[in-house]
């Protein structure tokens, strides 16, 4: 499978510059290749619109770029080890398809790039008022096209499912539509942390119809977890949380595929497993893991919803109940911009056990925090609804919510992104894919 993933702003620019013009027009994207066992994902890092003088021919039904312009693109791709994606427009409002002229032109481009930039794969996209179509350059292999921002949109998928939906989703289809239901079933959703919030997220996503999961957690079920981990029973004590979650999902959706990864997401080999996801839920309780997850969300253009709940108690009496749900995606500020990460806590979380034992500033273990399943459930349900807003268009615009149970109140908040942020800006890791190392530990 091949997939092209770019920011929603790039999608809007392509449509605005290419579609509905008097002649065909072109755009060129450079992308970082993310090669995985079951997928080649191309993450777009730059977009260029050739000037008029870069065309050798242009008409209503064809557009041809000059050889010297293509040579410059090929040289740049080879130097940066990037994939080239050639985009051009078609007239009309019908869903676009590649033409015989496209086939012939791509054959020449593919031969040229096989010499000039042979270390990666390249792509071709055609766009019209009727939609998008994409494939591997010079071949018939289709390429899924995904736009990422405050919403996650699949613009083209040759394998898009059709046919009836299961009767079990009848009430859901009445709200989301059959296309929305099929979309949920096509997504691969990762959950990092299968404790009090992550286990509830897994349960709700399975009920929604999500069928492909990546579960990451290093821990086993303890007796003190049984009050809040969905699906966990007394007999599950000492089993890995990922396995308990997978068993619960299988009971809800037979045939669901759950990849269980036992490990800490701050480790490079574990963090890289998230690259295969379409969407991430961050359900961890450490600053280090959140730092890694946010980097992956922006670097690989994989939207994420992070959640957390806090109960403050004194002498067995609840003093406060608070929750937070925040989306991480292009055009949304990251944790760093929002001032939500403690750099000292990140430093400690990135240490191995030996380093931590030698650090004079680390004093003992953290006191376990109070936890109640209903409060975890409230915050998780907010997060799942935000996920539905970002994927199938549930009408909810908020991407950062703060919950306070005492007044009670639920309010949307907003922060301003730092244009020079090393995470979520174009000057940082945004859309760099595998060309940028992860800030993780390799031990």
Image: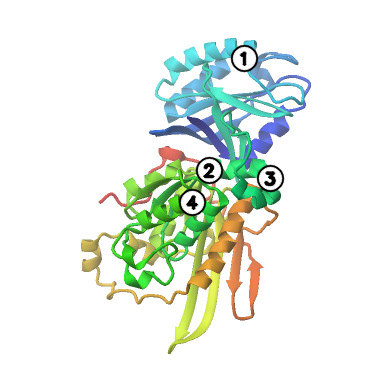
Q: Residue at (53%, 47%) from the top-left corner?
A: 210
Determine crowd level at label 3: few under 14, some 14-19, many 20+ residues with C-alpha closer than 10 A.
some
In the image, residue 256 lies at what x, y percent? Answer: 46, 45
Identify the residue position indicated by label 1 in the image. Answer: 102
The answer to which of marks 1 and 3 sits earlier in the sequence is 1
In the image, residue 22 lies at what x, y percent? Answer: 79, 21
Determine crowd level at label 1: few under 14, some 14-19, many 20+ residues with C-alpha closer than 10 A.
some
Gap between marks 3 and 4 measured at Cα: 36 Å
Callout 3 touching callout 4 (CB < 8 Å): no
Identify the residue position indicated by label 4 in the image. Answer: 423
In the image, residue 77 lies at what x, y percent? Answer: 47, 26
Relative to 389, is 348 above or below? below
The circle on residue 187 is: 2
Callout 3 touching callout 2 (CB < 8 Å): no
Is 399 in front, or is 380?
380
Secondary structure beneath dot 2 equals loop
Secondary structure beneath dot 3 equals helix
In the image, residue 223 lies at what x, y percent? Answer: 33, 71
The answer to which of marks 1 and 2 sits earlier in the sequence is 1
Relative to 113, is 172 above or below? below
């Amino acid at each position: 499978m091949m997939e092209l993933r770019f920011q929603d702003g790039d999608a809007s620019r392509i449509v605005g510059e290419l579609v509905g013009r008097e002649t065909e027009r072109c755009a060129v994207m450079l992308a970082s290749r993310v090669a995985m066992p079951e997928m080649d994902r191309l993450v777009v890092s730059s977009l260029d619109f050739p000037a008029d003088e870069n065309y050798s021919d242009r008409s209503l039904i064809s557009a041809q770029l000059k050889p010297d312009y293509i040579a410059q693109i090929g040289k740049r791709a080879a130097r940066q080890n990037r994939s080239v994606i050639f985009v051009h427009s078609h007239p009309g409002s019908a869903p676009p398809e590649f033409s015989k002229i496209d086939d012939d032109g791509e054959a020449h481009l593919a031969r040229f790039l096989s010499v000039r930039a042979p270390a990666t794969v390249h792509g071709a996209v055609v766009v019209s008022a009727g939609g998008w179509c994409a494939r591997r350059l010079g071949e018939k292999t289709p390429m899924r096209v995904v736009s990422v921002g405050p919403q996650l949109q699949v613009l083209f998928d040759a394998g898009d499912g059709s046919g009836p939906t299961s009767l079990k989703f009848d009430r859901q289809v009445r709200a989301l539509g059959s296309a929305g239901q099929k979309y949920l079933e096509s997504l691969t959703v990762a959950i990092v942390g299968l404790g009090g919030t992550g286990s509830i997220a897994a349960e709700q996503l399975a009920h929604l119809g999500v069928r492909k999961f990546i579960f990451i957690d290093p821990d086993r079920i303890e007796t003190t977890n049984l009050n809040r981990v969905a699906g966990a029973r007394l007999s599950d004590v000492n089993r890995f949380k990922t396995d308990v979650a997978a068993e619960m999902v299988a009971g809800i959706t037979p045939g669901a595929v759950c990849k269980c990864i036992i490990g800490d997401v701050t480790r490079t080999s574990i963090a890289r497993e998230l690259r295969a996801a379409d969407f991430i839920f961050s359900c961890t309780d450490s600053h280090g893991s959140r730092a890694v997850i946010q980097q992956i969300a922006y670097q690989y253009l994989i939207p994420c919803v992070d959640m957390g709940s806090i109960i403050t108690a004194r002498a067995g009496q609840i003093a406060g109940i608070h929750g937070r749900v925040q989306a991480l995606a292009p055009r949304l500020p990251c944790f760093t911009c929002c001032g939500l990460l403690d750099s000292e806590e990140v430093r400690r979380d990135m240490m191995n056990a030996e380093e931590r034992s030698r650090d004079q500033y680390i004093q003992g273990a953290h006191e376990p925090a109070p936890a109640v399943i209903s409060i975890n459930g409230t915050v998780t349900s907010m997060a799942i609804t935000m996920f539905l807003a970002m994927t199938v268009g549930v009408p909810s615009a908020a991407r950062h919510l703060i919950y306070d149970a005492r007044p009670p109140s639920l309010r949307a908040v907003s922060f301003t992104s730092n244009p020079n942020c090393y995470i979520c800006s174009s000057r940082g890791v945004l859309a760099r894919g595998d060309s940028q190392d992860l800030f993780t530990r390799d031990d």
